Amino acid sequence: MAAPRPVPVVNVANVLTLTRLVLVPFFLLALFTAGGHQLGWRLVAAGVFAAAAITDRIDGDLARKHGLITNFGKIADPIADKALIGAALVGLSLLGDLPWWVTVVIAVRELGVTLLRFWVIRHGVIAASRGGKAKTLTQVVAIGLYLLPLPDTLAVLRWVVMALALVLTLVTGVDYVIRAVRLRASARGAVSGAR
């Protein structure tokens, strides 16, 4: 029986992930142009953010559908997500549109999960969970609502979606800690059992 063909690191899914990373500075440029609150530039920033966020959905679907899943993609994809979402949160907080505590809570969780991934990387890769994907989607929608110049009557919608994003952020953060500890423990158990 022939061995499965290795998946090339340079594939369309990974290129889309890198595109998301490349779009981050363009998003920030649009967000801060003309003081950050000029309608036209705010719409451009929202559009660039949306385009970058859509690549996350497309690259994941392509990777699964065409068997393009690589260890590089498993690591680079969440990093690209964190770069985009982190840049948006920091930008919105710098502009005074989003309280800093929200940005700090999300940033600490995202940094913690990234460090956890590297902590266990030699034992295995922690792929994104369904909860993690729901968290990312909710964060993206919440940020989109903050980027768009909505009337005051819809301002409460921003907070409701962001509150849901915060809950998912914390719950999935705890889940990643549990998964990382279990992965490391099972890897150590396998090593000591092999001796």
Image: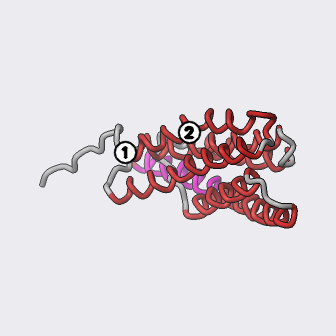
Say if the magenta span includes residue 178: yes
Residue 12: image tag: 1
Tell which of 97 and 168 is nearer to you.
97
What amino acid type should be assigned to the residue bearing mark 1?
Val
Q: Residue at x 51, y 45 (%)?
A: 77
At mark 1, the secondary structure is helix
Q: CA distance from mark 1 to mark 2?
A: 25 Å
| Mark 1 or 2, nearer chain start | 1
Residue 118: image tag: 2
The spot of residue 88 in percent (x, y) is 71, 43
Question: Which stretch did the figure color magenta?
Answer: 176-193
- What secondary structure do most residues of the magenta stretch adopt? helix
Q: Residue at x 60, y 51 (%)?
A: 50
Q: Is residue 40 left or right of residue 12?
A: right
Q: Residue at x 82, y 38 (%)?
A: 94
The spot of residue 182 in percent (x, y) is 56, 55
Q: What is the total number of numbered labels drawn onto the structure image?
A: 2
Tell which of 58 and 131 is nearer to you.
58
Residue 108 seen from this side: no
What amino acid type should be assigned to the residue bearing mark 2?
Phe
